[in-house]
Structure formats: C-alpha cells, structure tokens
Amino acid sequence: SPGTGHPEWIWRSGELVPWEQAAVHVNAVGHASVAAVFEGIKAYLAADGRRLLVFRLEDHLRRLADSARLCRLSLPYSGAELGAAAVELLAVNGYREDAYLRPWAFPRGIIREQMVPAEAACEVVIDSWPFRSALDKERGCRAAVSSWLRVSESSMPPRAKAFSNYHNGRLAMMEARENGHDWPVMLNERHKVSEGAGACLALVRDGVVVTPSLGSGVLPGITRDTALTLLRGLGFPVEEREVDRSELHLADEIFFMGTAWEILPVTTIDGLTVDDGTPGPVTRALSGAYGRLMRGEDDTHPEWITEVPLS
Ligand code: PMP
C-alpha cells in the first residue's frame, strides 16, 4: 500500500508484477537510458471522495507514443492498452488519495558496446506513487533565466519527453539553486523564452496572457493546453508567440504550468519582484479553475477525465 513507501504492484510489459520483483540487470541501466522516454500523469481524488479522476490520460499516452517515435523506439502497446493498464494499476494498488502515474519505455535487454539501435525491442513500465496537490495552497517561486539554452531542434527534439533531455533542465536547475533562485527559465537558440526545467511558462500583461509558441523549443505541455483552454473560457485573450526576456521583466504576472507543479506563480524573475510579489488575479482565477476541473467539480471537459471507482 502507499503507506509502505512503495506500491504493491508495478505494471511491466503486459503484467502486474510485485514491486520488489521489477528488477533489471545492472548492465541494462547505462546505455539503454539514453533512448528512454516517459510520462507523468496525475489521478486526483474527486471532491465527492468516491472516484479517482485520471487527467488527460489519452493525451499523455499519445505524447508517450510521439516521444518514442522521435527517439526511434517502437512501443509494443497501444495507447488504449496502456490506458487500461494504468487504470488497473490504480485500482490494484488501492489508492484513496491523489496518485501520480509514471509510464516509461526503455530498450529491453543489455546494451553495452554501442548506442541504442533503432530496432531495439522495448519494454514499458508503469510505476505509481501518492502525491499531495498544492493547488489549494498559497505558493510562489523565484525564477531566473539560465545561462543554459533549452535543447533545440538542431541538436535533439525538444518535443520528446525523453530522459536524455532532462540533463539540460538539470544543469539549469542546479545553476538556479546555486544563484539563490528556485527554478530556471530557459531561452531557446534564438534567445527567446522557452520553458522551465519541468514546466511551461506564461506571463500576463494588461490582462493578456502570453506564452511561448510550440515552436519555441517547449515540450508540448498538456497543462499548457489545459490552462490556455481554461483561460480562453474565462474570457482572457491568449497569445502563443515568440516571447522576449524583457517581457518577463515587465510582466504583471508569471506562472509555470505542468503536471507536477500544477499552476505555480512566479514571484521574482531575475531578482525583480513580479508586481507586488503575490499571485495576481489571472493566476488565481486559473488555479481555481484548474483545481475545480481536477476534483471533478467542473464537468465541462468529460473527454479529459478517466474515472476510476475506488476499490
Ligand atoms: N516541459 C518539461 C521539460 C516537462 O518535463 C514538463 C512536464 N511533463 C512540462 C514542460 C509540462 O508538461 P505537462 O503539462 O504535460 O506535464
């Protein structure tokens, strides 16, 4: 059960396996990781306490397939099969609280002497663990533009959620921490704003929401898409375009958006306080709408929710 530090079951290549038995040979760890891809998905406990609501499961699994294609791995399972596996895993592990799902795919077997060949057979695993949402908490973070540029189309596909891409964000994150900030903002190779180390980003100026376009080197964030849809529904104009660093410095509001961080307000950027240093009205309205959607209190997007009855 979640209280023991790990769930009872993990899903591995078509079957439920006891967590302790989901092992690989030590030699399967190094080279194979270079081509591994993954997803991060959240299942929220509904406000009525009777169901888990997996958020945008199909969209996340489609992105997993896209990431695999970009890394030239062939996934041996369809999105529908992985979706059913994820639902089964939540049920057998008996979650009665918010739970995070981590599907990932990696080349099977031991790859030692060469980099991963395109025809390598692939394993798929789904891990899970409980998490605590911070949506109802007053939060903020200090962000700073990194000296590390976001990986670009000229080196490796930024649209892939590939483990290898995360070394880029990791370097930026460590730099941010060394300089006394919480999170980095990465620019792309054109020196336009791209995204954070694990989340997309938007700013607000004069009531208009502005976010870097998908061609800015961002991961096509599912929270980004959700937030833009919610913001348009709330009546805010939204622009997806190239964004300059100085626009961040002049913004009334800035927030990160991602599955893990949900909607995270930025209170300082490059040491400048964003407005009065508290989350602004657009960020608050968005967080509220996002929270209602996650908890099943807003049923206007049934296509985004997969219900799992509590066992
Ligand atoms: N960019 C990066 C690099 C990420 O790791 C994530 C988290 N998956 C995001 C953006 C946000 O994507 P999503 O909203 O789909 O979680």
Image (spheres, helix red, strand yellow):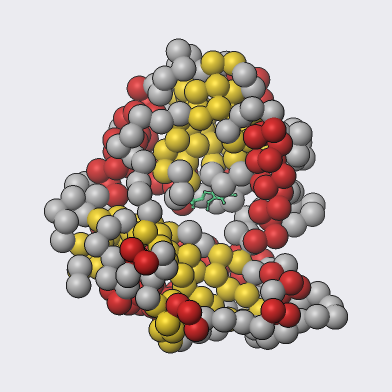
Question: Where is 56 relative to 134, above or below?
Answer: below
Question: Where is 299 relative to 120, above or below?
Answer: above
The residue lying at 35 percent from left, 46 percent from top is: 133
In this view, the residue in front, 45 or 122, is 45
On the image, the x and y values in percent for residue 269 come to: 59, 23
Question: Where is 121 relative to 62, above or below?
Answer: below
Whether residue 304 sits left or right of residue 182 in the image: it is: left
Q: For residue 247, which quarter of the picture?
A: top right
Whether residue 193 sits left or right of residue 130 in the image: it is: right
The residue lying at 65 percent from left, 41 percent from top is: 173
On the image, the x and y values in percent for residue 122 come to: 62, 81
Image quarter of the N terminus: bottom left
In this view, the residue in front, 137 or 304, is 137
Q: Of all residues shown, which one is farthest toward the top?
A: 276
Q: For residue 29, which quarter of the picture?
A: bottom right
Whether residue 205 sits left or right of residue 248 in the image: it is: left
Total of numbered circles in the picture?
A: 0
Image quarter of the C terminus: bottom left
The residue lying at 28 percent from left, 52 percent from top is: 301
Residue 35 appears in the picture as rendered? no
In this view, the residue in front, 112 or 232, is 112
Q: For residue 196, which quarter of the picture?
A: top right
Residue 19 appears in the picture as rendered? yes
On the image, the x and y values in percent for residue 190 come to: 76, 36
On the image, the x and y values in percent for residue 10 come to: 43, 76
Question: Where is 1 relative to 231, above or below?
Answer: below
